[in-house]
Image: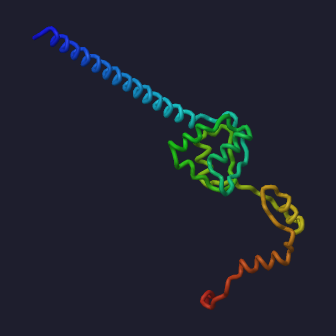
Amino acid sequence: MSEQDQDIALEQQQDQATSSSWLLKLIKLLALVLLISALSAGYGYWWLSQWAQTPIAQLTTQAFTVVKGDNVAKISTRLLRQGQFKTIWPLRWLLVKEPKLAKLRIGTYQISQGMSPRQLLTHLSSGKELQFSITFVEGTTFKQWLAQLKNNRNLSFNAANLTAIKLSKLLAQSLAVPDYPQSYIEG
């Protein structure tokens, strides 16, 4: 073998070694990137799970209304503007993780201090609305009852055209039960 052939063979070996070391470096770099990505995703998942269970510090006890057309983005923005949330982006990631929490129901709900984000969304999608009460004192007149209903801020009530006669007619229509002969018991 001539000296020139030996030089060519040596160059080919060096080229192969260089290309294989370059490929090996690329594989190591890709493995490192994949490892860092997997660790970051795992940490993000763990952090989101912890955040979803941690009570919201700024949340105060209040009546909160979900209206038609509201979604989690709208109510979270509303809570952010009220100062009930510091940030809302984790809520959106929580919905990616748990899409069932996005099914909000229309109604007025009691939000309690110390609720976690998961508890808040579960409550707003449960349909268990806040129950309001009104007390009619014995001895008050029908006009006083109407005034009490009209002044109740938790009740949408149109008493402008309602009179005792109209109300009795409405009640009579809704309570009217036809009498059938077989409903009588003969002894």
- Residue at x 62% of width, y 47% of height: 72
Residue 81 locus on image (x, y percent)? 73, 40
- Residue at x 17% of width, y 11% of height: 4
Residue 130 locus on image (x, y percent)? 69, 53
Name above or below for residue 77 compared with residue 170.
Answer: above
- Residue at x 52% of width, y 35% of height: 49
Q: How many marks?
A: 0
Q: Quadrant of the C terminus?
A: bottom right
- Residue at x 63% of width, y 40% of height: 115
Q: Is residue 48 visible?
A: yes
Name above or below for residue 139 compared with residue 38.
Answer: below
Given residues 180 and 9, the one toward you in this image is 9
Given residues 46 and 159, the one toward you in this image is 46
Q: Farthest left residue?
A: 1
Given residues 150 and 67, the one toward you in this image is 67
Residue 120 locus on image (x, y percent)? 62, 44
> 76 left or right of 43?
right
Name above or below for residue 123 compared with residue 29.
Answer: below
Q: Quadrant of the N terminus?
A: top left
Name above or below for residue 185 compared with residue 168.
Answer: below
> 1 left or right of 118?
left
Q: Is residue 187 visible?
A: no
Residue 118 locus on image (x, y percent)? 57, 42
State the image quarter where residue 159 is shown: bottom right
